[in-house]
Amino acid sequence: MKKKVVSFLLCAAMATGLLAGCGAADDGASTAAGTEAAESTSAEGNGDLPILGAGIYSSTDNFNSYIGKAIANAAKGVFQVNVDDGQLDQSTQLNQIDTAIAKGAKAITVSVVDITAAPTIIQKCEEAGNIPLIFFNKEITDKEVVDSYDNLYQVTSTGGDYGANIQGEEVAEWWKAHPEMDKNKDGKLQLINIMGDPSHTATQPRAKAVKDTIEKAGIELDVLEEDTGKWDTATAKEKMDAWISKYGDEVECITAANDAMALGALQSVEAAGYNEKGEESDKYVPIFGIDALPETLTKIESGEIAGSVLQDAKTQGETIVKIADNLVNGKEALDGTDLEFDTDGSKAVRIPYQAISKDTLQIAEDSYK
Ligand code: GAL
Ligand code: CA
């Protein structure tokens, strides 16, 4: 597999910021819903900086919100930006894009609510004078759509497995290091796998990759349950409540396709008497997530969650802003960076995932500083 170097320095962007006068960026740039009007107004007062129209698909999605914050942080001194909350509603998000364009946005970056809306968003950018459009997090995979606009870029994370190979390796390592994980001593791993939102590009690949990797490591799997938790803590908790009461100690491992759901599973098993004291608990079931959100890191430290996979929101946010800044200033998209586009010919930058356990917490902590 090709290794991409992501030693990514923002000196250029920061220097621009200093020249343009730091503090000019929209301090109110946040992803909070309902404050959009006020934030947009304040952003207008920010003088000379170009406008970046930015939007996440929903502030209810923890990880998406962290990328939104990373964009707002990276944009300080570079763009006037107001990160809109699409509120899970495609027409709301399209209106937000219209508003940004009407205000003179020089570039647009969004995590779409619904990937089938990509052509409409492309058309809006085209009509606004071929302004750069950078999709993030929710990848547009329809090649025809991607190739239909020259000024289209994507910033996501590496690989077709969406980080789940690493998650599978973490499970396999745990199994090898903890013989007691095989509670019923049948030589198989009884697993519950909580999947992402069914409409999401990463959902099927993550579910497949985590299981394939565990099996490739020579572990026979017995999947007790596999169902969607819709990326959501409450949904995952509700499903896990039913499963833990049905299976109890039969459950030997829980993999969740993101940390929000791993946290929901944790709440559920803790209510059933598991994991509260980490591995020292009387009853324990290892839980693995993906994203390595700050709210999970404390749970990994305490041992309540066994591991996660860092999806680097900060570097994604910095990359988005750097690409937009370069393009708005007439430079090549990746000018001044060590980044490369994917070899598949699309203008996609993929930021690597990284394994996070108790021993490597620092990597994830640093990425949220
Ligand atoms: C995934 C992430 C999930 C969720 C989803 C939404 O990459 O792991 O937590 O944020 O994107 O698009
Ligand atoms: Ca077993």
Image: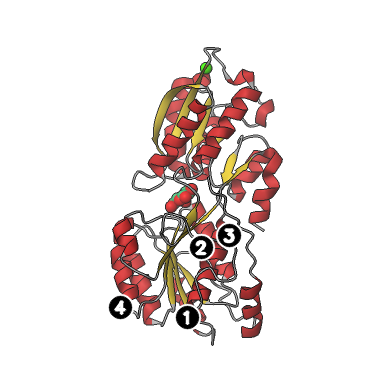
Pointer 2: what residue?
Answer: 68
Q: Amino acid at mark 1?
A: Thr
Query: Is 253 located above or below residue 150 in the figure?
Result: above
* Measured Cα–Cα span from mark 2 to mark 1: 19 Å
Relative to 319, 141 lies left or right: left
Pointer 1: what residue?
Answer: 41
Q: Amino acid at mark 3?
A: Thr
> 105 and 129: which one is in front?
129
Q: Amino acid at mark 2?
A: Gly
**Which callout, 2 or 1, points to the residue nearer the camera?**
2
**Which callout, 1 or 3, points to the residue nearer the camera?**
3
* Sequence-wise first label, 3 or 2: 2
Badge 3 element = helix
Pointer 3: what residue?
Answer: 315
Q: Position of residue 78 (x, y in %)?
A: 57, 77
Pointer 4: what residue?
Answer: 127
* Measured Cα–Cα span from mark 3 to mark 2: 12 Å
Badge 4 element = helix
Q: Position of residue 108 (x, y in %)?
A: 42, 71
Relative to 92, 173 lies left or right: right
